[in-house]
Image (cartoon, rainbow, N blue to C red):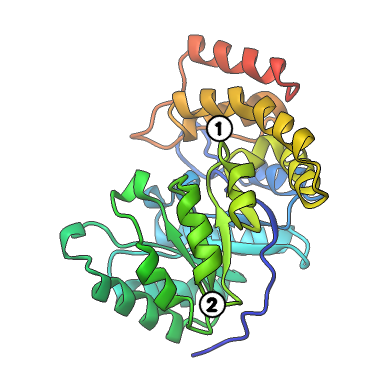
Amino acid sequence: MSTNNKISLAGIYPTLPTPFYGNGDIDLNRLHRNLLRNSDYCSGYVLQGSNGEYVLLDHEERELLVAYARRVIPSRKLLIVGSGMESTRATIDWTKCMSDAGADIVLVITPHYYGESMSRKALESHYMRIASESPVPVLLYSAPMFTGLDLPVEVIKVLSDHNNIIGIKESSGDVHKIKRLADETSENFQVLTGSSSQFLAGLNAGAIGGILALANIAAKSLSELMYLFSQGEMERAEKLQIHLVPITKVLKKHCGIAGLKAALEMIDKCGGEVRSPLLSLIDSEKDELRYILEQTGLL
């Protein structure tokens, strides 16, 4: 199945966490609040990415989250949903399910459990089959920090020619790779960076926006940074990027998802709990996080 992928991905997209109650149930009230609070600064939202704890959700929960989010967010905002599974068949099935639930675009992470067998030929075949059967455009997702597997430029170049592969979320932080992708892939292929600490560098290398955990708590600043870049005001953009470095570092230091949720609880009571086996921050970690949020003007 081929679709029209003439959708602009330019902009900021927060990778939404999935808020839970203390007993592990999904907290839709907190999700609702987080979906609406950054609407003025974001082009859309990403559900069930790495920060969404998607590997800890069952199928009914994943469908519920997408259907609920699609009802809440304005129709003009894109809803990008993770649908990657380890097998090609399961990814195709889940992609169709996420499309039916309301996804505008699916984000497909690299299969990685059998990493040594994931040759260029295997990866090309996997993504080509998914894109050919997906009812919505496919966004590639390379996240070697989670998978241990980098999606090579040579593979991405081949995949970029498929008319239903819209672009990539490149989360390695490799600015040189982003530049190669921007320069060497097909004309309609769009590159988004997944690195908050390298956001400005990614834009300078050819990315047209970012899918970022930091956008949950600093969407206004990231949107302003992107605007300054578009206007050629690099000095002001660089100052803003530097201003965001402390919060990026402290979130990375404190367990990623747990730190992000703790920050959202402090800012607007919309983070919720993590789901076991993940652990929440301890009090001393929360104190450090609160201090950095206050120092950067986010709290």
Which comes before the other along the chain, label 1 or label 2? 2
Front-most of 146 and 227? Answer: 227
| Position above or below: 108 against 209 | below
Name the residue: 49% across, 9% down: 284
Tell me which residue sits at (47%, 44%) in the image: 173
Q: Which mark is residue 260?
A: 1
- Residue at image position (68%, 30%) is 269
Identify which residue, 283 or 113, lies in the foreground.
113
**What is the count of numbered marks?**
2
In this rendering, position of residue 100 left or right of residue 157:
right
Distance CA(mark 1)–CA(mark 2): 35 Å
**Residue 172 x, y percent position in the rendering:** 43, 47
In the rendered image, the quadrant that contains the C terminus is top right
Q: What amino acid type should be assigned to the residue bearing mark 2?
A: Ser
The label shown at residue 2 is: none
Mark 2 surroundings within 10 Å by alpha-carbon count, few (fewer than 14), some (14 through 19), many (20 or more): some
SS type, badge 2: loop
Provide residue 50's location: percent of width, then percent of height.
45, 48
For the point 80% across and 44% down, the residue is 228
Q: Give how far across and how far down residue 22 sits, in percent.
A: 49, 31
Question: Residue 94 placed where, x, y %?
Answer: 42, 71
| Residue 206 in sight from this viewpoint | yes
Q: Helix, strand or loop at disc 1?
A: helix
162 relative to 246, above or below: below
Q: Is residue 14 visible?
A: no
The answer to whether 270 appears left or right of 284 in the picture is right
Placement of 237 over or under 74, stated as above or below:
above
Residue 58 in the figure: left or right of residue 80? left
Q: Residue 240 lies in what quarter of the image?
A: top right
- Return the residue nearer the eye: 257 or 114: 114
- Three-letter amino acid code of the residue under disc 1: Leu
Which dot marks residue 186? 2
